[in-house]
Image (cartoon, rainbow, N blue to C red):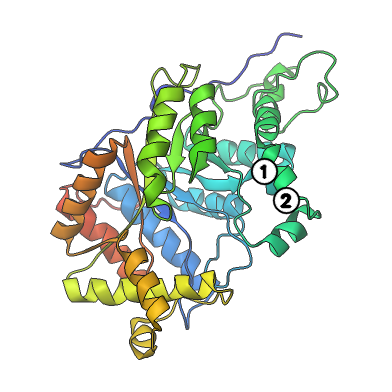
Amino acid sequence: MSRRHPTVAEDEIRGTAQGTAPVPLSVLDLVTVGSGRTAGDALRTSVAIARLTESRGFHRYWVAEHHSMPGVASSSPAVILAHLAAHTSRIRLGSGGVMLPNHAPLVIAEQFGTLEALAPGRIDLGLGRAPGTDGATAAALRRSDRLREGADDFPEQLMELTRFLDDDFPDGHPYRRIHAVPGPVQATSPGGVQSPHRPPVWLLGSSGFSAQLAGSLGLPFAFAHHFSAQNTIPALDLYRESFRPSAALDEPYALIGVSALATDDEKEARRQVRAAALSMIRLRTGRPGLVPTPEEAEAHEFSPMEEEFAASWNANVIHGTADEVRAGLDDLHKRTGADELMLTGNAHSGDVRLRSYELVADAYGLPAAAAAS
C-alpha cells in the first residue's frame, strides 16, 4: 500500500528574529506555583504569558515535564499544550520536553498527533531522556527501578516514536500494522485526508549525549543552559561538529534555555531571583515545595553553604532592568552563537513573570501588543 509520509518544513523549525533581537526569542514555562497560589493560578498565568508573548512576536512557547514537585505544575505537557492551543492562534507550542523513557512511544505519537490536529503546523515535540524527577518517582512512572536501562534505550525509543509519527515501520516489523491516530494512516484510508505535516522532533539535553545524537540525526537541538551553563559551549560545539543534513534540516539549528528575569527596578530583580534560588536549594536538598515569596527569602537565614549555592545559581540568571537583561542576552548570544534564545523566568508571582516578558519585548522593540485572538 502506498503511504504519503508527513513532512517537516525547515521554516517550522527556524524562527525569524523580531525587532532588534539578535535571534528569535521564545519561552520555556515551568508553570511555577508560588506560595499561597494554586495550580489553577499558575495555569492561568501560563495562558496570560502565552497570549502576551504571541502578541509581541515571540516564536515558540514550550512547557517542560516535571513530576512530584509541588512548585512545578507541568506534569502533563500535552494537556497544558492543548489548553494553550485553545487560547492562542499563531505562536508555536511544544514540549521542552517530554521525557521519553517515562512513556510508551506510541502514546506520545498519539498525544502529539492529537495536538497537531488541534493546532496544525504549530506543534513541536521536544524530547529528553532524563526522568524529570527523582529516582523513586521515575520508578513509579515507569513501573520499574531499572532507570539506567531506560536512558540507554533512548535512541531506540526515539526511532520507534519517529516511525509511529511517520507511519513507516518496514514490512515484517511487529508494529507494521499498528498506527498512531491521529496520524498519516488516515490519509491512506478510503476517502482519507490528513495533514501533510507532523510535529518536528527536537532533542533536548544538558550534556554531550543528546547533542551528538541530535547532530548525527540532523535534528534541531535545545540545550539546558539555565541549569547546565558550564556545558553549553562544549555541547553546542559537539552538536555542530556531529551534524549531518537530514530531511528536517540542511544546517544545524540550536536554541538554548536561559533563566532571565527583567523588572522595573534592579533591586526588585535581586529580591525575586534570591527567592527562586531558595526554592532551588530546597529542591536540591530533598525538600521541594512551592516557590517562596521574596519576603520569605528575606526572612530565611541562609547557611554559608546555601549562600554559596544561591550566588552560584544566580550567576547564571540574567536579571535586572530591561536594559541589563537585554545586554546579558546579547552577550550570551555572542558567546554561544545560539540560533534562538528560550527565556524562562522563575518568580513567585505570575504578574512578575508576565511583566518580565513585556519588558524584554519592549527592550528589543518587538511588535506592539495586538488584541489577543
Disc 2 crowd, CA 10 A, few/some/many (<14, 14-19, 20+): some
Residue drawn at (73%, 37%) of the image = 106
Work out whether 363 lies above or below 231.
below
| Residue 362 in view here | yes
Q: Are marks 2 and 1 in contact (CB under 8 Å)?
A: yes
Residue drawn at (70%, 23%) of the image = 167
Point out residue 253 in the picture as x, y percentages from the top left corner: 39, 29
Residue drawn at (57%, 25%) of the image = 195
Judge by depth and name the residue closer to the eye, 259 or 25: 259
The quadrant in which residue 336 appears is top left
Q: Which residue is mark 1?
A: 151
Point out residue 58 in the picture as x, y percentages from the top left corner: 31, 45
User: What mark, if any, has residue 147 been given in the picture?
Assistant: 2
Judge by depth and name the residue closer to the eye, 97 or 18: 97
Q: Amino acid at mark 1?
A: Ala
User: What mark, if any, has residue 230 been given in the picture?
Assistant: none
The residue positioned farthest toward the top in the image shown: 2
Work out whether 168 lies above or below 74.
above
How many angstroms separate mark 2 from mark 1 (CA)? 7 Å
Point out residue 299 in the picture as x, y percentages from the top left corner: 36, 91
The residue positioned farthest toward the front in the image shown: 304
Q: Amino acid at mark 2?
A: Leu
Is 49 positioned to the left or the right of 62 in the image? Answer: left
Work out whether 346 lies above or below 282.
above
Judge by depth and name the residue closer to the eye, 175 or 246: 246
Residue drawn at (54%, 77%) of the image = 289
Is 208 positioned to the left or the right of 156 in the image? Answer: left
